Image (cartoon, rainbow, N blue to C red):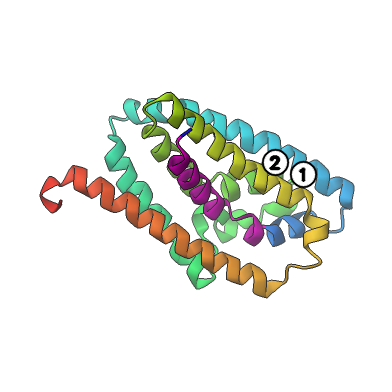
Amino acid sequence: MDQALFLKIFAALFAIMNPIANLPVFLSLTADRGAGFERKVAFTLLISVSLGAIFIGVTGDAILRVFGISLDAFRLAGGFLILLIALNLISGEKSKAHHGTEEERKNVDEQENPAIYPLTVPILLGPGTISTMIIYRGRVTDTPQEIAYIAGVAAAIAVLIATFFAAPFLSRFLGQTSTSVMSRLMGMILAAIAMEMMVGSLKVLLPGLA
């Protein structure tokens, strides 16, 4: 297994999905519904996020080919989008790409089970997550990298779902300060990943810069 690729994919998805920072969102959407409802939502999330990740991994390259988009052009656009999300995390603001507009958030209370909307889409499997998965999938060229890609995505989802299953326990210890610190730390990591994507793509698209 390509350990470097595994760590890059895991770190990128962990930073974008940000389970610690999104834990208060999960708790607010399941508040006053009991521990059983929280487990039901977490289990539904496990299925929906996993299926979404499989779909993206399988069809990502095909989507780029259908629209005639090169991987490096997509990597440049995806890196820019991820940079915007990172800047929102650093400044303590919610990204509209992953949390929706104000009008979209008004529909949240009407959802019987918030696992699919808004937790899976757009919060966890939003544009930033999808872009990251497609970009790294396009860099897979052999079996060790294929294993690393699958393992990295699976590990990120496992940590995410484990965090939500442990929500009642973790909520006793995680306050606003810890989530704010984690959000800004993940923002810095995302910003670095975004810059690496953008610089790498620019070197290919504009060889003179290299």
Q: Are marks 1 and 2 in contact (CB under 8 Å)?
A: yes
Amino acid type of the residue that numbered disc 1 sits on in the rendered structure: Val
* Marks 1/2: CA–CA distance: 6 Å
Q: Left or right: where does residue 128 sit relative to residue 163?
A: left
Span of residues in magenta: 2-22
Residue that appears at 49% across and 69% down: 90
Residue 168 placement (x, y as % from top left):
83, 57
Q: Give the residue at x 48% y 32%.
A: 1
Quick one: 4 or 80, which is closer to the camera? 4
Confirm whether the magenta stretch covers residue 19.
Answer: yes
Q: Amino acid at mark 2?
A: Leu
The residue at 71%/44% (across/down) is 115
Residue 88 at least partly seen: yes
In the image, which disc is placed on residue 45? 2
Q: Secondary structure at mark 2?
A: helix
Residue at 72% x, 55% y is 26
- Residue 83 among those drawn in magenta: no
Q: Residues within 10 Å of mark 2 (few under 14, many from 20)?
A: many
Q: Is 122 positioned to the left or the right of 90 in the image?
A: right
Secondary structure at badge 1 equals: helix
Magenta stretch: helix, strand or loop mostly: helix
Q: Position of residue 18 (x, y in %)?
A: 59, 55
